[in-house]
Image: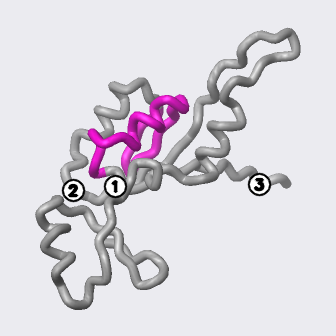
Amino acid sequence: MDYTPEYSYLCFMTSDTAEKSKGVSHVADVFTYENEYKIDPALMSKISENRGKKSAKGIDVPDLDLEVGISTFGTDDSNLTREIENLGASNVYQSGKDIYAKVLPNIVEKLSAGFYNYIKFIWYKLKFVILL
């Protein structure tokens, strides 16, 4: 369970538990965590700005390899790195509850889909360069 602003929490639970939670006196409401909520707006912006780009000669520009971080709820994610690799990702590794990978935009959309319920959030991993 993670606290989010405005007195709310993000929890991984079954639909039965969610229904039961609605009856608890101090619970105002329970909402489904939709797939599109899992993708960082900055990452979606990066995907959108490259989609459909053409070169100066009118040739389609290939999709960018995006370095992303993937946070999980920490439940049943033991095979997730292998599953992400099977989708076509590269440089996949896990650090704590977070997984990092280099992926194409279509993989980001697949990861946010329902099959990967234990994925909490996918964000664009910024690269920092120190100039001396």
Residue 98 visible, this orientation = no
Q: Position of residue 2 (x, y in %)?
A: 35, 73
Q: Which residue is mark 2?
A: 75
Q: Secondary structure at mark 1?
A: strand
For the residues bearing labels 1 and 3, Cβ distance under 8 angstroms: no
Q: Secondary structure at mark 2?
A: loop
Q: Secondary structure at mark 3?
A: loop
For the residues bearing labels 2 and 3, Cβ distance under 8 angstroms: no
Quarter occupied by residue 54: top right
Q: Position of residue 67 (x, y in %)?
A: 56, 40
Q: Which residue is mark 3?
A: 130
49 relative to 32, above or below: above
CA–CA distance in space, label 1 to label 3: 30 Å
Question: On residue 82, which mark appears?
Answer: none
- Which label lies toward us, 1 or 3? 1
**Which residue appears at 36% of the width and 58% of the height?**
33
Q: Is residue 65 left or right of residue 81?
A: right
Say which of 99 and 61 sits in front. Answer: 61
The amino acid type, in three-letter code, at marker 1 is Thr
For the residues bearing labels 2 and 1, Cβ distance under 8 angstroms: yes
Quarter occupied by residue 66: top right
Q: Which residue is mark 1?
A: 72
Q: Position of residue 27 (x, y in %)?
A: 27, 83
